[in-house]
Amino acid sequence: MKDKEIEKLIKEEGVRERKVVNLIASENFASDDVREALGSVFTNKYAEGYPGGRYYGGTAVADKLENLVRKRALAVFKLSPEKWAVNVQPYSGSPANLAVYLALVSPGEKIMGMSLNMGGHLTHGQKVSITGKIWHQIPYGVSQKTETLDYGEIGEIAEKEKPRIIVVGYTAYPRVIDFGKFRKIADSVGAILMVDMSHFAGLVAGGAYPTPFRYADVVMTTTHKTLRGPRGAMIFARKIKINSKLTIAEAIDKAVFPGLQGGPHLNAIAAIGVALREAGQPSFKTYAKQIVKNAKVLAEELKKLGWKIVSGGTDTHLLLVDTMSRGIGGKEAAEKLERAGIIVNKNAIPYDTRKPSDPSGIRLGTPAVTTRGMKEKDMKKLAARIDNILKR
Ligand code: DSN
């Protein structure tokens, strides 16, 4: 590389990534092939529009690429192209969620989503996000007693508020979600059911987490977390009518382009295609199952060492540790671990009374360490190390 300053930083980041133990639940290591596609000639090309209907010349190869990636996306999640369509153009998760609302929810209508401090995401209607300014968030959370979803209470909130859309799928929820129960709640109030599977998409692809597709009207995901692709997102939508003119899928396509975005990042789409091919291999099933096994062992071992794990454990790739239960704030815990080479993020725990900049816990995730080959025995050692570091 001629730019020595940037080259140096890329090398520095490479060394950092190799040296630390990465327990950030939303990060991963994309393969060399994914990164090669990301740095390919597709970065040079504009292709506003969709295959067969572009606003630029020279898009024949772009059309082949986008069609192939769409086909792979449907295949990985075992979806029939008669019933489902997928949009692979969203730049990332936040614009993807914005596009779904733009397509399906009129300004001022209600988005029912989990509050950020309970494990939800900013873009599920949180006030500080544009999604909470254009639309009106009806928050829900988890039970204070079990720290898991209380479907009875969620049903009551939906019944009272009659939201236009219910958003399911979170950034800090360690348990399996009963999508069937959410379908019943959505049907009982005439709401659209949207699943944000960004965190667990790779687990769904690898058969280590229940599929939301049986129940949802719309499923979106980022592509860089458990799915192990480049930064990007996809929106899967049913081909059923949302109004007299459009299907849900058509409305979403219009919202992504021209509603919200300009030219798709074809290089990212190419890299998503590579990641989807990888996710369709038998080895990815083994990987996804190992992520969950590792998280379970990490949670169990930390529990044995006296740490309180939110909801008592995990069914997924992540766990929340209530560090305050042993007198250590989340910020201090994360900093102590980082000084010892273990990277985590501070995280609110349900019903947290501390501020988001220094909450009561930390979030640990196993997708990245599992990519690096760690297994159950490594999780036992890791739990002991975390315990030692936090006790110092
Ligand atoms: N920032 C992501 C996470 O860490 O969960 C969600 O967008």
Image (cartoon, rainbow, N blue to C red):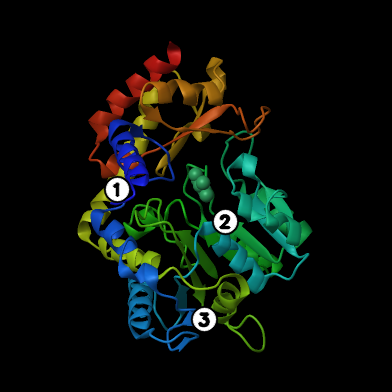
Amino acid type for the residue under numbered disc 2: Val
Amino acid type for the residue under numbered disc 3: Lys
Q: Element type at marker 3? A: loop
Give the residue at x 32% y 26%.
Answer: 382
Badge 2 is on which residue? 168
* Residue 192 visible in the picture: no
Q: Position of residue 233 (x, y in %)?
A: 46, 62
Sequence order check, earlier mark of 1 and 2: 2
Q: Is residue 32 left or right of residue 118?
A: left
Q: Position of residue 114 (x, y in %)?
A: 63, 49
Q: CA distance from mark 3 to mark 1?
A: 31 Å
Q: Element type at marker 1? A: helix
* Residue 118 visible in the picture: yes
Badge 1 is on which residue? 289
Amino acid type for the residue under numbered disc 1: Lys
Badge 3 is on which residue? 239
Count of labels shown? 3
Q: Position of residue 312 (x, y in %)?
A: 48, 32
- Specify the quadrant of the image occupied by residue 119: top right
Q: Is residue 310 left or right of residue 155?
A: left
Camera-side residue of 309 and 155: 309
